[in-house]
Amino acid sequence: MASGAFWTFREPNRGIRAFRVLFGLLAVPLAAGALVWSPPGRPVEGVFVLGLLAWVATSQGLSIFAESYLSLELGVYLWAFLCFDQGSAMVALATTTVLSIVQKSWENPADLDVEFIVRKTGNLFVLGLSLMAACAAYAWAGGGAPLELLSRQNIGALVLFWAAFTVVNNLLWAPIDLLREGKGFLRRFIPETALDGALHALSMLSGIGFAMVYPHLGVAPILLALPVILVALVALHRATVSRKVLTSQLSLLQRLNEGSASLHQSLDQREVLDAVEQVCRGLFSADTFFLALLDERTGRVEYARAVEQDKVLQLGSADLNQGLTGHVMRTGQAIFTGDAPHEAPWNTMVRRVGDDRHPIRSLMMAPLANKGRTIGVLSVQSLQAHAYKPFEKELFLAVCQQVVTAVAGARLYRRATEDFLTRLYNKSYFEERLQTCLADGESFGLIFMDCDDFKAVNDRHGHVVGDQYLEALGRRLMGLCRGSDVPCRYGGDEFAILLPGATGEQTLQVAVRVREAVAGLEFAVGGRIARTTVSLGTLWSDGTLKAVPVEDVLRKVDQALYRAKTRKNTIEEAAL
């Protein structure tokens, strides 16, 4: 498939895509056959007007019960069938489809793609086949055409018309619904079919009325009534849309309140980032989003959390003088784009990290300002053009205010609990978490380590290089830990790792990986290599000894470390 925007499919389910393409292809011979199904004397202008009326009925339909949709479209097709013939009804249906595609290309040409066209032509196939089945059922029951009065026979034929259309229409859509919803679809099929049938019955009432008036009074009374009908439909449509918008806004505000509470439940930065991700994806259905924070030491932007299509991305740092993120960070101004690839200057600044076949279209990006100083940037993006409405933009700015408060609190807490050089946890926080594990009776593993002959690194290369080596060592340790682990710089060149919930075997495995990782860490300095090894002491607790003081645990593991240091680059185990 070509990578252009027109030829892309946003539908992720391959089975659904296959059904839509199949229906779209089958619609072509169905529409062509409609041209020869009725005598040559068909009033072309009248059929086109009927198609126009059906398109108006479709575009101004009413949303009822959330996803259910009431349109008078079927009424127009019934009118065409009863007053002209089945072919006229099919041509009116084809005209409606063409007008819908033209409307889309005029309103949002950037959103016109092969998926939309296939979906519309697929609808033509399903409705056309359903309409053919309904017309056949009406004729089989001996229904009159034209419909001059509602005799018992005509009423029975109309009921069969309605039943055939409803059943065939829902059965043809059933495979797509089943692929989308799985087994849960079967529980909803009958109730949804019943509701769909009720809406079809309401639509047919208008068609029956038009069909009975037309043979006696012609089209003039109907055309005179159309402006009133159209105005009423537009008014009801707008009222329905307004109701949906208000309902959506109230739902978003409720979710914002729930999300705000989750943002402030923890001071742990990882948990705050998790909450930010849930809020952004829950409120804005973001295809991609990221939270970037300013690293005050390096002056660069670090991507604390970036997600694309449910996949967490590991992104490097960014220069403040480059890209859209740097622009927002420097200027402190929010950016909202509805079609980024076609809006200058953003089209040259938006960078797609993952699948570049699906470019980012809609984008909201705002600075996170704390006490007049920008500390980061939050952004949500969509693959759909003009995906975010004005209310959502205001809501996004409100979310940013909540996020900056949570992030600032987490950063202050982090600074109070971390070692500035290595960015690992500090000694006091480490011992506090160890005390919690003991008090809660939680099993844990404990690793203490000390760099072998680290003084030689300082003597040979200087303390600045020694600090840089310790910083690199801290990053290496962080990369070996789980999110729940507590890596710590205990003091000087001594480090520790608390492994909540770990077994004795897992603790030893982590210790082995740490020893091998440090032995392989080489730090280049002026053509020479700074390296060292570590000695490690380990301890494991099954959580049954709750009354053991923290000092006794630390003493035990420290004794194991002392034994390891006598031999260097080894691991010694201690028992609690």
Image (tube, grey):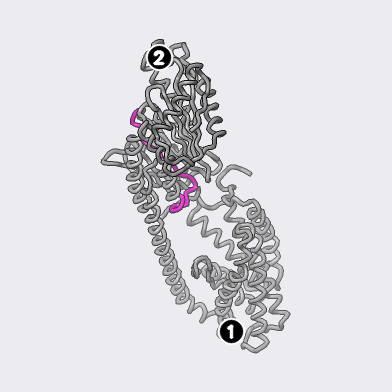
Amino acid type at mark 2: Lys
Q: Over which residues does the magenta segment extend?
A: 281-297
Tell me if residue 317 can be seen. no
| Quarter residue 329 falls in | top left
Q: Secondary structure at mark 1?
A: helix
Quick one: label 1 or label 2, which is nearer the N terminus? 1
Amino acid type at mark 1: Met
On the picture, is 34 further left or further right than 263? right
**Residue 564: x and y, percent?**
49, 21
Q: Does the segment drawn in magenta span residue 61?
A: no
On the picture, is 147 further left or further right than 369? right
- Which residue is rendered at x = 53% and y = 42% of the image? 311
**Residue placed most toward the observer, 436 or 1:** 436
Q: Residue furthest right?
A: 140
Q: Residue furthest left?
A: 371
**Residue 240: x and y, percent?**
44, 68
**Residue 415: x and y, percent?**
33, 34
The quadrant the N terminus occupies is top right
Tell me if residue 381 can be seen. yes
Residue 44, above or below 101? below
Name the residue that disc number 2 marks: 455
**Residue placed most toward the observer, 154 or 482:** 482
- Which residue is rendered at x = 65% and y = 72% of the image? 165
